[in-house]
Image (cartoon, rainbow, N blue to C red):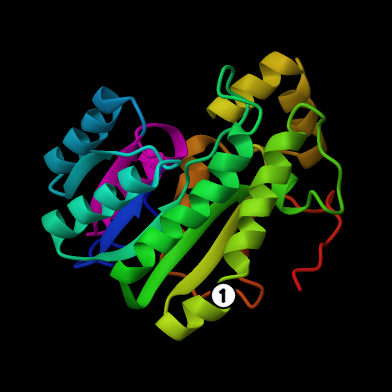
Amino acid sequence: MTNPLAPGSLAGRVAVVTGSSRGIGADTARYLAEAGAAVVVNYRSKAPRADKVVAEIVEGGGRAIAVGADLTDAESVAAMFARAVEEFGKVDLLVLNASGGMESGMGEDYAMRLNRDAQVNVVEQALPHLGAGSRIVFVTSHQAHFIRTTPTMPEYEPVALSKRAGEDALRAKLPDFATAGVEFVVVSGDMIEGTITATLLERANPGAIEARKADAGRLYNVSEFAAEVATAALEPIPADHTRYVGDVSGFTPVSLD
């Protein structure tokens, strides 16, 4: 996939990408670095994967560091931003990519703790470091964004509800963002082929991804969707703060008031 961002378009910027040791987050980190940003590659437990992403960026002439942080732990998140500022001097761009909730053994409330509570915590920890002109990008799915008006697969519903709750909690902070001069955009995409969520959903409901693909006509792959997330780092903010990726014709519009 060709990088949608022009070389040097993010020169001098510093980006923190949560959940970026693999998948969409990793490709987003690569695109941002290729455009000139210094990137913090965040991971929860897979340090070797994060180190590999960093090595690829550095070998390509970019700047990056890997920083482990459990986003559900406030002290861990604070340490991540402290390391980012220590290494690069500031933070200009926060990509909230990390999400989950279909993993086994994490507790019944894990989806809400990660997709709502942790997102709010990360943003609150980031705000003191984000100056005017900085941007927060929240990554979600159509199935979550439209969950108020369009039912989703039962297996995915708890995740969808928690991610919508996270989006709502962040939108409630729009006045605070405006006061600080911080821009906010939601990137909503359809199911993405090749992600861990799609894999777990397919395991729980065989045929679900192919069925969605048939309904939508096509699904984006990881690198294609990551390119759209990276593009959101620079594109003008939409009037409703939402950048839609992929088909939305099967979803009923939801009021964002």
Check the image and report above or below for 124 versus 23: below
**Residue at 83% from the left image edge and 62% from the top image edge:** 253
Q: Which residue is mark 1?
A: 174
Q: Is residue 91 visible?
A: yes
For the N terminus, which image quadrant?
A: top left
Check the image and report above or below for 74 versus 26: below
Outermost residue, bottom direction? 179
| Residue type, mark 1 in image | Leu
Q: Is residue 228 visible?
A: no
Res. 234 image quadrant: bottom left
Q: How far across and how far down the image is residue 50, in percent? A: 27, 32
Whether residue 208 appears in magenta in the rendering, the answer is no
Does 36 sit left or right of 226 as displayed?
left
**Residue at 61% from the left image edge and 53% from the top image edge:** 166
For the C terminus, which image quadrant?
A: bottom right
Does 20 sit left or right of 84 as displayed?
right
**Residue at 76% from the left image edge and 26% from the top image edge:** 155
Q: In this view of the protein, which residue sits in the foreground, 61 or 25?
A: 25
Res. 218 image quadrant: top right
Outermost residue, front direction? 75
Q: In this view of the protein, which residue sits in the foreground, 148 or 207?
A: 148
The magenta region covers: 19-43
Q: How far across and how far down the image is residue 164, in percent? A: 69, 51
**Residue at 67% from the left image edge and 44% from the top image edge:** 162
Q: How far across and how far down the image is residue 117, in percent? A: 55, 49
Whether residue 35 appears in magenta in the rendering, the answer is yes
Q: How far across and how far down the image is residue 198, in percent? A: 62, 27
At mark 1, the secondary structure is helix
Q: In this view of the protein, which residue sits in the foreground, 70 or 39?
A: 70
